[in-house]
Image (spheres, helix red, strand yellow):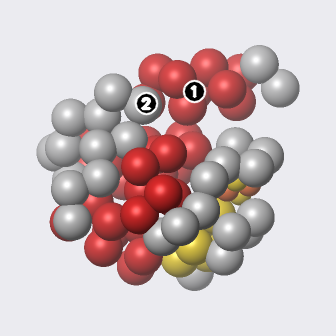
Amino acid sequence: MYVCNCNGVTRTEVDEAIAAGAQGPEAVLAHHGCEPCCGRCLPEIADRLSVGGIACGGTARARSLVAAE
Ligand code: FES
């Protein structure tokens, strides 16, 4: 299942990036050589980060990006 449709990043790939130490949504995408385009995936990636119990400095920024739309 795709989490980031712009970059074709799947949920499994998000979890791989988190396991490798990515600590924010942008870092998760960067782990796979991508960067945010529309930003719609950032809240879901932030949620995956918080479910994993990993501190996520990008959560507030991700939510503000979506709220700004
Ligand atoms: S869905 Fe991830 S940047 Fe657009």
Confirm whether residue 47 shows in the render: no
Establish if 31 lies above or below 69: below
Confirm whether residue 16 shows in the render: yes
The spot of residue 54 in percent (x, y) is: 19, 43
Establish if 55 lies above or below 19: above
Assess whether mark 2 and mark 1 are in contact (beta carbons under 8 angstroms).
yes
Ligand 1 shows up in which quadrant of the image?
bottom right
The spot of residue 62 in percent (x, y) is: 55, 31
Query: Where the N terminus falls, by quadrant?
Result: bottom right
Q: Secondary structure at mark 1?
A: helix
Left or right of 55? Residue 35 is: right
Q: Residue furthest left?
A: 53
Q: Residue furthest front?
A: 33
The number of numbered badges drawn on the structure is 2
State the residue at coordinates (28%, 60%): 18
Which of these two is toward me, 32 or 14?
32
The spot of residue 15 in percent (x, y) is: 33, 69
Q: How packed is label 2: few (under 14 Cα within 10 Å), some, or many (20 or more)?
A: many
- What is the C-alpha distance between the residues marked 1 and 2? 6 Å
The spot of residue 58 in percent (x, y) is: 42, 31
Q: From the image, tell me which residue sits under label 2.
A: 59
Q: What's the residue type where badge 2 is placed?
A: Thr
Left or right of 44? Residue 65 is: right
State the residue at coordinates (41%, 49%): 27
Q: What's the residue type where badge 1 is placed?
A: Arg
Establish if 8 lies above or below 19: below
Image quadrant assignment for residue 64: top right
Left or right of 12? Residue 20 is: left
Q: From the image, tell me which residue sits under label 1.
A: 63
